[in-house]
Image: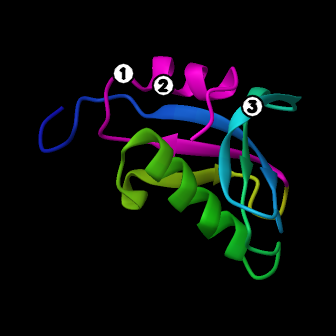
Amino acid sequence: MPGGSDRVPFTIPVRVRPAAARTRVGGRYDGPYGPALVVAVTAPPVDGRATEAVLRAVADALGLRPRDLALKAGATSRDKLLEVTGADGLAARVDALREGHES
């Protein structure tokens, strides 16, 4: 594409567990968007704080910058869709986390 990236965005279904004792990324939840990656964050589900914490936690677990992730759906829901741009080989990393290899 002229003037743009030719990479296709990668979508990650996520199930959020807000107000957890500690931040963890790993595990599987069969949610409305399909098999979701479970993300526990210490932030409460107030004023988007949990969503911001989820973006940081997933970015860290995948070795990305938080700005490489964006919320695609589920702003006020525990079930969210995250969109990742600018990274290759994410499917295997997400699958490993989803199958219980926590970060």
Q: Which amino acid does label 1 sit on?
A: Gly
Residue 86 part of the magenta-drawn span: yes
Residue carrying label 3: 27
As helix, strand or loop, the secondary structure at mark 3 comes to: strand
Q: Nearer the viewer, residue 74 or 64?
A: 64
Please tell me whether residue 31 is drawn above or below residue 41 in the rendered image: above
Badge 1: how crowded within 10 Å, few (<14), some, or many (20+)? few
Residue 4 as seen in the image, left or right of residue 100: left
Residue 85 part of the magenta-drawn span: yes
Badge count: 3
Q: What residue type is labelled 3?
A: Gly
As helix, strand or loop, the secondary structure at mark 2 comes to: helix
Range shown magenta: 78-103
Spot occupied by residue 92 in the image (x, y as percentages of width and height) = 48, 17
Q: Which of 6 and 97 is in front in this view?
A: 97
Mark 3 and mark 1 lie on one chain; the one further toward the N terminus is 3
Residue carrying label 1: 89
Spot occupied by residue 65 in the image (x, y as percentages of width and height) = 35, 55
Marks 3/2: CA distance? 12 Å
Q: Which amino acid does label 2 sit on?
A: Arg
Q: Which of 73 and 37 is in front in this view?
A: 37
Badge 2: how crowded within 10 Å, few (<14), some, or many (20+)? few
Residue carrying label 2: 93
Give the residue displayed 12% in from the left and 37% down from the top.
Answer: 2
Give the residue displayed 62% in from the left and 66% down from the top.
Answer: 53
